[in-house]
Every structure is written in structure tokens, then in C-alpha cells.
Image (spheres, rainbow, N blue to C red):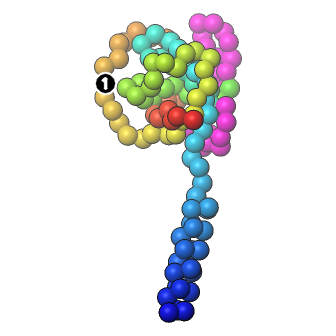
Amino acid sequence: MKKVLLLSALSILILSAGDCSKKKTGYKGKLEIKGICMNYTIALTEGNIDTSLIVANWTDENTGKAYKNVFKLGSPCTFPSSIKEGDEFSFTIDTSVMNCQVCMAYYPTPPKSLGIKVVEK
């Protein structure tokens, strides 16, 4: 009986220790530019992301305004329409591919795009 209790306690400790070591993969971003036809520019405001996935410095050729740590929205199908220019939100990187129709009008965006999924706070 003591062995069963000891094994149960040991199992619980091992399983709960695994949960504590998991890293969060969430980030915070800000919708900087809500351009026509989902040509959105998002700035990373919080979180450590692989710097090869974003653009360190980019200037909007229409306005001349400079931005840091930005990327083009690569997942227009799932981005909430309720997020307005200037809003901050939490997100995770989403590598799944979804095809949806987006009009072809152009607005300048950073050269790198990133698929993201907005998550509730």
C-alpha cells in the first residue's frame, strides 16, 4: 500500500513539474496601418520573436513614417475586423494556410509577412 501511495505521489510531482516548464509562445502587437484590402502592418510590442520573421526598420512610402519591428499580416482570413488601427492585441504565430478572397488594391506593407492568430486576453 505504501508503494502505491509513494508511486502516486511521485507521478503527480513529475507530471506537475512538466507544466511549470512550458514556455508561453504568445506575443503582443499593435495594428499600425489598416491599409486597403487587408494590407495591414503590425508592430511587435511584446515578446521575443525570431528577428528573421520581422522587419527591424521600415518606412511607409505613402506617409514617410518609420516603424520598428513590423510585419505584414499574413493571415487576413482570420484577423478580427473589430481591431482598429492603433489597437494592441495578443497573438500567436499561426503557420496554417487558409485561402480567402482579398481584393487586389495595393497599400505599402513591410516585405515580410507573418501568419498570426489573435487570442483573447
Please report the bounds of the magenta region as a residue range: 45-67
Image height of 47 relative to 40, above or below: below
Of the pair 40 and 109, the residue shown nearer to us: 40
Quadrant where the image shows the C terminus: top right
Residue shown at 52% from the left, 39% from the top: 92
Q: Is residue 49 magenta?
A: yes
Is-magenta flag for residue 105?
Answer: no
Q: Observer-nearest residue: 101 or 3?
A: 3
- Residue nearest the viewer, comparing 50 with 90: 90
- The residue tagged with tag 1: helix, strand or loop? loop
Q: Residue at x 67, y 31 (%)?
A: 45
- 80 shown above or below 64: below
Horizontal side of residue 104 vs 8, given as left or right? left
36 relative to 45 in the view: left or right: left
Q: Residue furthest top?
A: 62
Mark 1, Cα crowd under 10 Å, few <14 / some 14-19 / many 20+, is few
List x then y, in percent, for residue 86. 62, 17
Rendered residue at 57%/47% (across/down): 25
When asked about the image quadrant of residue 79, the answer is top left
Spot occupied by residue 94 in the image (x, y as percentages of width and height) = 45, 39
Indicate the position of residue 36 as horizontal and vertical percent values: 46, 10
Can see residue 109? no
Q: Amino acid at mark 1?
A: Cys
Q: Does residue 19 appear in the picture of this structure?
A: yes
**Residue 110 is drawn in which quadrant?**
top right
Q: Which residue is mark 1?
A: 100
User: Vertically, is 44 above or below 21?
Assistant: above
Question: Could you say where residue 28 lies in the image, as x and y percent from the top left?
Answer: 62, 34
Residue at horizontal 60%, vertical 54%? 23
